[in-house]
Image (cartoon, helix red, strand yellow):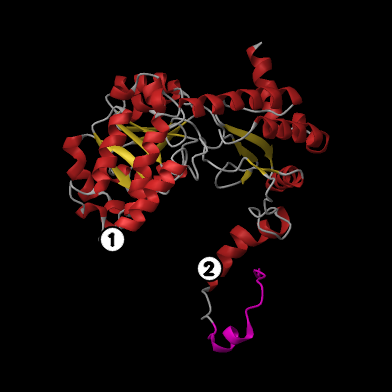
Amino acid sequence: MFEVQESPAPAALTARRPADPPLTSHLYARIEKDFARRFQEEWGGRPITRGRTPGPDAIRLDSNDYLGLTGHPEILDAVVAALREDAHFSIQSGVFLLDAHPSRAVEKSLALSMGKDDGLLCQSGYAANLGLLQAIADEHTPVYIDSLAHMSLWQGAQMARAPARPFRHNDADHLDRLLARGGPGVVIVDSVYSTTGARCALGEIVEVTERHNSMIVVDESHSLGTHGSQGAGLCAELGLTDRVHFITASLAKAFAGRGGYFTVPKELRDYVLTQSFPSIFSSCLLPHEIAGFSATLQVIRAGEALRQRLWRYVHRLRSELRSIGYPIEGSEQILALEIGTESAAMVLRDALEAQGVFGAIFFPPATSRNRSMVRLTVSAALTDSEIDQVLEVAREIAPQVKPWTWPAARRAAGRSAAAA
């Protein structure tokens, strides 16, 4: 039986602590089947997500704070002021908040900045996707979902008991055929896909959605703040906002906070509030979080220089990593070093971290089997010298990790040969 090795507890605690009751044999069997062998054989007996501890000189490419707003003085001032001033407030479900509550001003400001009527703040981007889909889909609503869409969108469809019909990634023709067979429903895509950094073929997918009298949900978690005029997102950048029914987003990416959001037409807001379980059964955001988002929105809208810096780094890293031999797909600020197996991804992660470069290891269920990767996310907070160092490390470890032999490299070569 697999056992997790833990540090021994102090004697004073173990003397008072009663033994836990035994777990069921079914759970033990699940752990053995789904985890224990993987832990020992694929991961070498150590948790896959735990690498080195970053030191003070580490180059961090493992954060979604794309504009580098963590610690921004204007945002901190707003948060601190709210903590000091809001000594008396009610922690309650978001469904009870009145129009005078500060969250309503933030919800309306976010909607206005994105070109929409209104919206709802949520506890997270995950909660936003679950709550919205639960309100707009049911067992009679086919949900057509991109195969690489975020897990929260799949879970939202499941929570709505809607039949999920995946279509091939970014393949509008495949979506068209599925809609022709299955009838009108809800189409679900990410604007920028969180594992590959690919941009959604949004124009084509919106056209197909309209042709089949369906609704579309676009998760802008990785484009709100970074794309479009004043950071309004990819829908706004492409001029598609008025053709997209619902936009969702995590506010833990460019907004560098803890929360989520989705747009909703004014006339549907009360309906959604009373149908969305995350709104009903979870507490609202706290006053200092709301104040932080209000200040962050203003910083983002004025942050064109930050966006320009971000994209300068993105283009340089993508171009030079490809020239070294790394098979980088996509086009946006997420760079996937897709090496293949989980054990290979750990070797790549360890090689980077040994040289002070920290990315995030991704593995099933965040990726498909044998498509594990180290994901690098670019931030405007980086410096030119840090970009130089990342590229130097990539060159140095290339003979060890051999990126030109990765399955992703072979697939890219096959596509190039087919196109020729």
Residue drawn where x is 70% and y is 54% of the image: 43
Name the amino acid, label 1.
Answer: Ile
Q: Is residue 47 above or below residue 370?
A: below
* Residue 310 appears in view: yes
* In magenta segment, residue 224: no
Quarter holding residue 106: top left
Marker disc for residue 16: none
Percent x, y of residue 15 = 58, 89
Marker disc for residue 91: 1
**Which comes sooner in the sequence, label 1 or label 2?**
2
Report crowding for label 1: few under 14, some 14 to 19, many 20 or more residues within 10 A (C-alpha). few
What residue is shown with label 2? 27
Magenta segment's dominant SS is loop
* Residue 285 appears in view: no
State the residue in front, 240 or 410: 240
Span highlighted in magenta in the image: 1-19
The Cα–Cα distance between marks 1 and 2, rounded to whole angstroms, is 36 Å
Which of pointers 1 and 2 indicates the residue nearer the eye?
1
Name the amino acid, label 2.
Answer: Leu
* In magenta segment, residue 9: yes
Residue drawn where x is 29% and y is 61% of the image: 87
